[in-house]
Image (cartoon, rainbow, N blue to C red):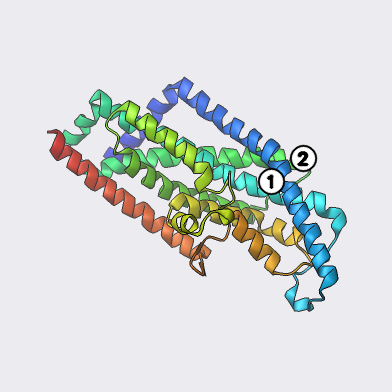
Amino acid sequence: MRALSNIVKRNLSVYIKDKENVFYTCLSMLIIILLMLVFLGDMNIDIVKDALRHMDKLMQETVLPSESLLPGTRNPALDDTNAKTLVLSLIIAGITIVNGISASIGMLSMMSWDEETGKLAGYYVAPISRFILVSGYVISAIFLSIIFSVGTVIISEVILVLTGGTIMSPTLAIKVLGIIVLNSFSTTAFLFFITSLARTRSAYNGITTLVNTLSGFITGMYVPIGIMPGIVRNALAFIPMAQGSAWIRKEFTWDALNTTFAGLPKEAITEYCEITGMNLKLGDTVFTPWMQCILLLVSGVLFMLLSSLMMSKKKVRDR
């Protein structure tokens, strides 16, 4: 445990000392928050309001039994406020995952730097297991990912309150924190496995650029997962960061969903969740929170073991 603690402390201290890296990571986080809230916010709010008006017309043409409707009373006068709260909550949840990914892969750059400068060879000859070595890099990245994810939630909640929204409840805050920790573990282990393939700084930078570019699409931030081809949706169901994004967005928006679609058919929430990717499906099976929890845990452990095996192979190859 002492070796693990020393590796984690060393990685965090080296990262923090690089003031330029920390600055640009924070700046990137703030830019993403502002861009998503300002530009994508209005567009998605209009989409929700149009959907509500369309449902109102259908309700006038068809009489449905009360048991087929969501609890509450339909109030079109509150559409602007409700749609805004729903969309901003959805965006905040997505940004939280994306910023966590960016912070995690930024910290994992330590390994490529150590690889290129030859410092990693010192770990290879040290009396520590490859699993401890992998854990040191992964835990460092998990810490940073959690810090940036929680920071994103706090900043976004302040913006949401200032724009007329409501702050999350303590119960929801605890759930969100738990999902952030679990998702950071699974995603970081997955990213470590991918980035461990890089032998040079330039190769790592190429992988980083690819991950940062694709993360917005994988998490459904840029393009709704529900409108993607079926084969793509099925593939995303096996990617940890996609499952983490779907889970946290569902928790973030559940109260807003029920408020926005109050008095409308229950299928309204189901369809909205499928379009936005909050309900990830494999065939006809919708992933439940428990299934997502198990998938994130198992994938995290699996990729850490695979990374340990890969590091062991590197030792044999490099010596």
Q: Which residue is mark 2?
A: 163
Q: Is residue 31 above or below residue 138?
A: above
Q: In the rendering, which numbered label is found on residue 88?
A: 1
Q: Is residue 69 left or right of residue 301?
A: right
Element assignment for label 2: loop
Which one is closest to the eye, mark 1 or mark 2?
A: 1
Residue 2's x, y, as percent?
A: 28, 39
The x and y percentages for residue 114 are 28, 28
Q: Quadrant of the N terminus?
A: top left
Within 10 Å of the Cα at label 1, are there few (<14), some (14-19), or many (20+) other Cα atoms? many
Identified at 34% across, 38% down, the residue is: 195
Q: Earlier in the sequence, mark 1 or mark 2?
A: 1
Compared to residue 12, the image places residue 172 above or below, namely below
Quarter of the figure with residue 28? top right
In x, y percent, where is residue 294? 43, 62
Left or right: 180 with respect to 201? right
